[in-house]
Amino acid sequence: MSAPPPGTGSADDAVIAEGLTKRFGAFTAVDRVTLRIARGEVMGFIGPNGAGKSTTIRMLCGLVEPSEGRASVAGFDVGSQSQAVREHIGYMSQKFSLYGDLTVRENLRFFAGIYRVPAGEFAGRMRYAVSMAGLEGQENTRVATLAGGWKQRLALGCAILHHPPVLFLDEPTSGVEPEARRRFWDLIHDLAANGVTTLVSTHYMEEAEYCNRIALIDRGKLIASGSPGELRQRGLGGVLYELECSPLGAALEALRGVPGILEAAIFGDRLHVVADSGAAGTADLTGLLRGRGVAVGSIRPALPTLEDVFVHLVARGLETRAVG
Amino acid sequence: MSPRRLFAMMYKEALQILRDPRSLAIALVMPLMQMGLLGYGVSLDIKHVPICVYDQENSQLTRSIVSRFDAAGWFSIDRRLHSQAGVRHAIDAGECIAAVVIPVDFSRTLASTGAASIQAVFDATDVNTSNIAQGYLQGIVAGVNAEIETRWSAAHGVRASGVGRIDLQPGTWFNETLDSRNFIIPGVVAVILALIGAQLTSLTVSREWERGTMEQLISTPVTALEVMLGKLIPYFVVGMIDAAVCLALTVFWFDVPFRGNLLTLFAATALFSLVVLGIGYMISVRIRSQLAASQIALLVTLLPTTLLSGYTFPIDQMPRVIQAITLIVYPRYYVTILRGIFLKASTLFDLWQPLLGLVVFAILIVWLASRAFHKRLD
């Protein structure tokens, strides 16, 4: 499954949100979020706690009514066809939400009944869900006594019993140990390989790399979206150079106010410089610094981490907000 | 509505009822406790109940019987009386709850006929205490009887029964038929059902909110109606079991005569259960904390049921305005029906008015309940 190029959406997209907004009193939790997720795509929803990830997912599931905007999921309008939407989605809320006083089998049987899984198929699907969660032999264990990773996988198993084409997973891996988190992501990719569209939120930046596309959200606003590679390449709005030079302070001073230099910051014993793409090359930079008496050891283009990009975008958002 | 989803909800709910010690305790133990508490009132525990004795014979045998009354600890013999008028006065003045009168020819009659009577007169204005006192007095007399028999067979070498049969002849004054109990206890059943019913369902939705399972549940295609029925039906079964237990206790333990029709009783009980379960459910939908929901449920069921249903305070003696208000106090209809069925053998036709009242309430509450729950978080 490959993601379509950004900006081109098709009516066929599994999730379409246009200007989704949610206000709680004077507080705007989600501010005009527009996004599309193609079929079979794994989209990561990245942002700090309280950024509006959960509220957006809840609006897409029909659990919370948008104050403005519209959305469709699996071809159904979230507002007017919420019942059809619910038949076609699987949802895992942030808080663990299976019935702890019921056993593994009883939970699965319950959701199979609620989703009207054909009786003839239940046994097979339950076997699949149990093995996917790694709970063979524990079918009669009360769910409350399971450890975190197993609970999460079982919750996923319950959410996909009815083979929904679209999955919404709200921080499914929070509080789960790293090993279990990796297994969980393997499961998501198995599902994607079968054409399941997934929107998964997380605040673990490293998990963003597992997604086909990511949407960065901060204070209710979608601040960027694209594949992890694209974001790392373009997210800073220029090319990132990593410089070994000394003295660092003088170098920083030298670069301030130079046209084409967007950002410069000390990173440990190095300097990170973001330059307008095309405006300044490595040679220009070297010349500029040497002209100011800075010894330049090495200079090379580098890829920022997603965290760099995120921090950059959030900072820029704050500036524009402060200005405007 | 999908039968499959409804069944899944009901099955899940039933499993949770069976696994949750709190709701099981509410469902099964509380009605028994309340039946005991409300049925016996607060005077369950009797100790040193004042009694008076008029021992006309005053022989060794009668003195030993009297000393047994004293020794048992349940009674304190406050006064010895010397005339029938004294008995009357002592009870009238409330100096004792019971007066024991041993006839002048007691020993002689016992020896010649093998049977004799002791009279016990109870002040039945305090029905419960006098009932219990009567039971204990009878127990003491039975002990004396057994002893006389043992002594007789030891002396004669033959086992015999009925050699010395002392009979306690109870008589009650002022409330001869003890009908306050018959009047109160059917009402107690209504109070208990209202309390328990609303308590049970008040926890069921708020529990899902508290544990976070509600968010998952409303993300599924299950409809509000299926949630409501899936939760009410299992608790309806529990409520009917409770009702059966309480009504059985009423008849077989408290000896309230049952003169009416079982089917009418069932229909009225089913309607009443539906109303109280529906009220608890509505509270639970609105109040997302179990504790708060159960307290509100207690408040809205306990007060109207105990004060305004006519269970203790007769409605026709209330001020007109209050009488009018009781028309919307749904338990009054059930209390009326229960009393009618138990005491007056009223038929379906006799009870059409209160039955209609319950039907209206059941429809109204279920309709409101079905609209109360929205599959939204906000």
Image: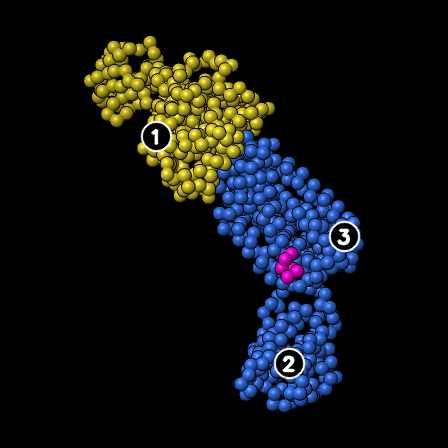
Display colour for chain A: yellow
Q: Which residues are magenta?
A: B247-252
Query: x%, y% of residue A263?
Result: 34, 19
- Kindly state the secondary structure of the residue where label 2 is placed: strand
Residue B130 quadrant: bottom right
Mark 2 or 3, nearer chain start: 2
Q: Which residue is mark 2?
A: B166
In the rendered image, is residue A24 in sight?
no
Label 3: chain? B
Residue sitting at 37 percent across and 36 percent down? A136
Using the rendered image, report if marks 2 and 3 lie on a common chain.
yes
Q: Residues within 10 Å of mark 1 (few under 14, many from 20)?
A: some
The amino acid marked with disc number 1 is Arg
Residue sitting at 49 percent across and 26 percent down? A89
Q: Is residue A121 left or right of residue A267?
A: right
Residue sitting at 41 percent across and 34 percent down? A154
Q: Which residue is mark 1?
A: A183
Using the rendered image, report if marks 3 and 1 lie on a common chain.
no
Q: Which residue is mark 3?
A: B347
Label 2: chain? B
Which residue is at the front of the view, A66 or B168?
A: B168
Q: Residues within 10 Å of mark 3 (few under 14, many from 20)?
A: some
Q: Is residue A63 left or right of residue B272?
A: left
Q: Which chain is blue?
A: B
User: What separation in Å lies between label 3 and label 1 (alpha carbons)?
Assistant: 69 Å
Looking at the rendering, in which quadrant would you find the C terminus of chain B?
top right
